[in-house]
Amino acid sequence: MNTRKFRIAIVRLSALGDIINTAVILQIIRKHYPEATIDWIVEEAFGPILQGHPLLNDVVFVPLKRIKKNRSFRLLKETVKRLRGLEPYDQIIDAQGLLKSAVVCSLLRGKVHGFDRNSAREGVAARFYDTTSSIPYEMGVIKRNVLVIAEALNIPYDNDAILHKEVLFPAGERPQWLSHETKAVACVIGASWPSKCYPKERFATLCSMLPYPCYLIWGSEAEHQDALWIAENSNNAIIAPKMGLNELVSFISYCDLIIGNDTGPTHMGWAMNRPSITLFGPTNERMIFPTPINIAIKSPSAVNILKIDRNDFSIRDIDPEIVLQKALELLS
């Protein structure tokens, strides 16, 4: 066990699912560097899920979306000054591999490690790094995230450390609106692309067949409208209140099963050690870390992970009966 007081910066700006799938590394770092100072640099919209995390010393919010939306040179200048003013780090790690994350890393003081040109999602990012890791892009995203950080810190990779992890985020109290009298199923009906979304008609059928209340998670107004439709066309669907990130963590931690599309709230089931079923169409099982209680159901289409087809709507072909069978196995 290394007791050197390293200062470590993890740069993973977005999105929610990617942050969730990277957070497991905090437990691994603390095991090998218990006295380290660990900061996380994150897009401000996703900062609340990390703020106050017991394994982090600080969470640094970066308002990239707000800078872009408002075209604010003043805010950009303030952000650059704030990042450059942070204390130097012994190791800065870009766990995202994008040009924007690499540029943020370059504004911090310290040695930067990231994916090499052939491994990064955007190869140009590698030009900003002092050292790199060669990790196939086709590899599962969670293992990739762990490997790039572990290699930067000279930590041996341990598959069991991921498989037998503790919950990744602190959870609050059980939501008052969540029934205590029966098991609860969370249904994540939205996603970043329409082709990643299981059809509302299929969700309504699935909810009607499940023996426990199905709580519909939504984030946008379009998703809220879909939730209303599902609730009207199923005798077993309940529209969950709109939740912030910390409320979502607490809700998921008290659910008995999460069923949903390839998106952050579904991945939260794995993060909180809750049973989950992730439905895939244009993407595949690479996006999760399968366990006996966290499984994938993939549509029949082939996926080229290096060139995702956003017009692949084959998720529609997943039979609700197949999802029901797996759900009942996990609920039992």
Image (spheres, rainbow, N blue to C red):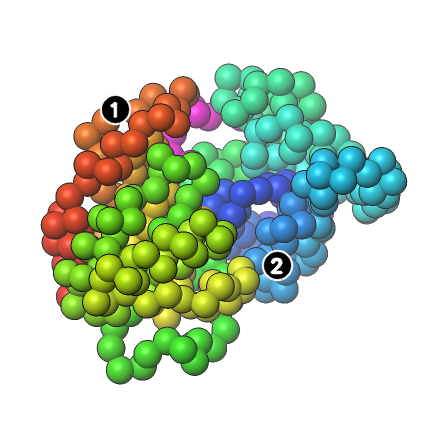
* Nearer to us in this view, 138 or 197: 197
Q: Residue at x 47, y 77 (%)?
A: 173
**First of labels 1, 2 by sequence position:** 2
Q: Residues within 10 Å of mark 2 (few under 14, many from 20)?
A: some
72 to 103, vertically: above or below: below
Which part of the image, by quadrant, shows the C terminus?
bottom left
Question: How far across and down, in percent of the image, does residue 276 sit?
Answer: 29, 55
Q: Residues within 10 Å of mark 1 (few under 14, many from 20)?
A: some
Q: Residues in magenta?
A: 133-141
Q: Looking at the magenta stretch, what is its main secondary structure?
A: loop
Amino acid on which the number 2 mark rests in the picture: Pro
Q: Secondary structure at mark 1?
A: loop
Q: Is residue 22 left or right of residue 181?
A: right
| Residue wearing tag 1 | 302
Amino acid on which the number 1 mark rests in the picture: Ala
Q: Is residue 26 left or right of residue 295?
A: right
Whether residue 147 is visible here, answered yes or no, is yes
Q: Residue at x 85, y 36 (%)?
A: 73
Q: Residue at x 62, y 21 (%)?
A: 126
Question: How far across and down, in percent of the image, does residue 42 sit?
Answer: 64, 46
Res. 177 image quadrant: bottom left
Question: How far across and down, in percent of the image, does residue 237 sit?
Answer: 28, 65
| Residue wearing tag 2 | 48
298 to 175, vertically: above or below: above
Question: How far across and down, in percent of the image, does residue 252 sit?
Answer: 40, 64
Q: Residue at x 68, y 54 (%)?
A: 59
* Nearer to us in this view, 202 or 98: 202
Q: Is residue 116 left or right of residue 167?
A: right
Does the magenta run of residues contain 134?
A: yes
The tally of labels here is 2
Q: Secondary structure at mark 2?
A: helix
